[in-house]
Amino acid sequence: MMANKKGLYILLGISLITQATTSLAGGIIGVGPFTDTGNINTAMSSIAGNAAAVYTGIFLQIITALVVIVLGTALYQAGKHINKTAAVIALCFYLTEAMIHIVCQIIIFAIAELSRQFVNSGDAALVNIINLLFISRNFCGAIAMMPFGLGAILFYYLIMRANVIPKWLGLWGLITVPFILVGWSLEAFGVSVPFALYVPYVPWEWAAGVYILIRGLSYKSKAIDAGITPN
């Protein structure tokens, strides 16, 4: 039992840290920095000229989506004994989030390819198509935060009740996740929300991941100190 809990905590900690890191890196490296120009033609030229960075961002975000699946499964295992129905619902939300993230990356890949074609051919007909894809990409990215927010509220409550994380860390997540949920829901429908609204949550996944990872690794030392060899 000790070995199983140790492995689960290590997986959960690594998944939280990895998901937070790849998501941030993908956003910084990927298509975002090349689209804040206010001019669709300039944006397409910038994307075509920085294709390697855009594709790297797509790769990192796909990794993020895959890690979200692993993370959701680990959170389910950690919290299902508290309320299995809530854990199943939360896992479904996380799987939905992962699928939406994949769809977003397909859209971004299409934007990158059409931008390259536009730069090479100058075909004005591509501008409207790419503009529509940009709108779809922004909407897709925003609505992905809806299932994330709903699933996170359930999971954070369950792992706090299961004593995987301390109460203060659980409350931090439960209080700040709704800002993500409400903020991105508004942004999905064109309402501008200041980034400051999201700042209180941003460090949570790293903080929780490090805490859980250290706790998982400590099970080994406790087992050795007690003269027990984990299986």
Image (spheres, rainbow, N blue to C red):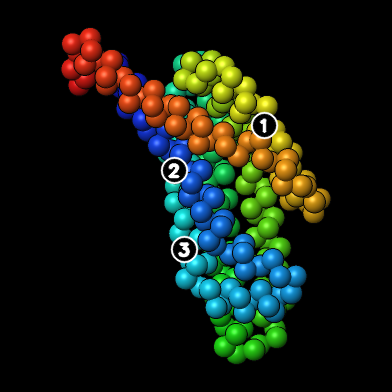
Task: Estimate the spatial distance between the alpha carbons at disc 1 and disc 3, rounded to whole Å.
Answer: 30 Å
User: Pointer 3 and pointer 2: residues touching (CB < 8 Å)?
Assistant: no
N-term mark: 3 or 2: 2
Quadrant that contains the C terminus: top left
Please tell me in which quadrant of the rendered image residue 77 appears.
Answer: top left
Q: What residue type is labelled 1?
A: Thr
Q: Residues within 10 Å of mark 3 (few under 14, many from 20)?
A: some
Q: In this view of the protein, can residue 205 be seen by the observer? A: yes
Q: Which amino acid does label 3 sit on?
A: Thr
The label number, if any, that marks residue 56 in the structure image = 3
Q: Name the residue under label 2.
A: 18
Which residue appears at 71% of the width and 36% of the height? 179
Q: Position of residue 53 (x, y in %)?
A: 50, 67
Q: Name the residue under label 1.
A: 176
User: Pointer 1 and pointer 3: residues touching (CB < 8 Å)?
Assistant: no
Against 186, is 120 above or below? below
